[in-house]
Amino acid sequence: MNLKLEKPIVFFDLETTGVNIATDRIVEIAILKVFPNGNKESKTWLVNPEIEIPQGATDVHGITNEKVVTEPTFKELAPKVSEMIEGCDLAGFNSNRFDIPLLAEELMRAGIDFDMKNRKAIDVQVIFHKKEQRTLSAGYQFYCGKELEGAHGAEADTNATYEILLAQLEKYEDIENSVDALSEFSTHGERADFAGFILMNEQKQEIFSFGKYKGRTVEEVFKENPGYNNWIQNADFPLYTKKVLKEIKERMSAPKDTMSDADKLQALQQKFNLR
């Protein structure tokens, strides 16, 4: 079984200093790039996180402070990582909730912009949990019939994730072999940001998922409380969340001649409703 691809897809895994998207750092990144013709390209880097690696994190992935002290920082590696994933869809294990958001934060801290506007994301863990409710090691055993040697090492986890997805496509005839279908199936709900602070409602409007404005549209809140965006921009929220809110704010302030057709129609309807 081969993936049906229209453009390259990057499977990747991160080992980190912890699980806080906004404050933790990458200590290892492995990338497996799969091309539409079936060719593959892979690269693994150890990363100096420039902060202390907690013992609890080392107990999980085995990477110590001493092991990465002479390795390049992510800022130094960022151009290579960005180049390797440029124009690619992304895939991983729990990647929608963790790896993609954290990678975005690291790239943006390094001064490289990142978004998912022209990418699809496949989260193999979501497919796995919807179908079997297991861990990565158990999934590798279940789908591939093999023990996962080197679990919690970025390279081993990345290659296992790729093999599991191929096996899932073999096993489940109701899952279409396309990036669009796999991305849709492996998404729990539509988010405007990676961390899930900003969701999309049924009308495709951005809404807050937290705090006193939970469930209300971002535009409505910004009109009612203009200072709320400033508070978020200065608080400990992920950089990508701040970027999304900044873009919404700029969209709201855009001149009328740059409004979308939908916005123009809505404004016209509101005008006549007022009459």
Image (tube, grey):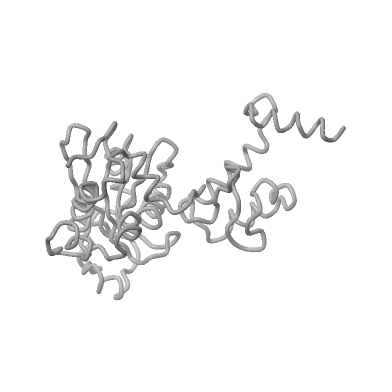
Q: Residue furthest top?
A: 257
Count of marks overlaid on the render: 0
In this image, 89 relative to 272: left or right? Answer: left
Q: Position of residue 203 (x, y in %)?
A: 60, 43
User: In percent of the image, x 16 and y 40: which residue is there?
Assistant: 40
Q: Nearer the viewer, residue 16 or 206?
A: 206
In this image, 39 relative to 123: left or right? Answer: left
Splitting the image into 4 quarters, where does residue 176 fall? top left
User: In percent of the image, x 40 and y 57: which residue is there?
Assistant: 97
Task: Tell me the quarter of the image containing the C terminus.
Answer: top right
Q: Nearer the viewer, residue 62 or 151?
A: 151
User: In percent of the image, x 24 and y 47: which residue is there?
Assistant: 169
Task: Tell me the quarter of the image containing the N terminus.
Answer: top left
Q: Residue furthest front?
A: 173
Splitting the image into 4 quarters, where does residue 119 fall? top left
Q: Position of residue 45 (x, y in %)?
A: 21, 52
Q: Nearer the viewer, residue 142 or 16?
A: 142
In this image, 90 relative to 269: left or right? Answer: left
Q: Position of residue 70 (x, y in %)?
A: 21, 59
Splitting the image into 4 quarters, where does residue 39 fall? top left
Q: Position of residue 15 (x, y in %)?
A: 28, 61
Q: Residue furthest right?
A: 275
Q: Is residue 54 above or below residue 144?
A: below
User: In percent of the image, x 65 and y 28: which residue is there?
Assistant: 259
Q: Nearer the viewer, residue 218 or 173?
A: 173
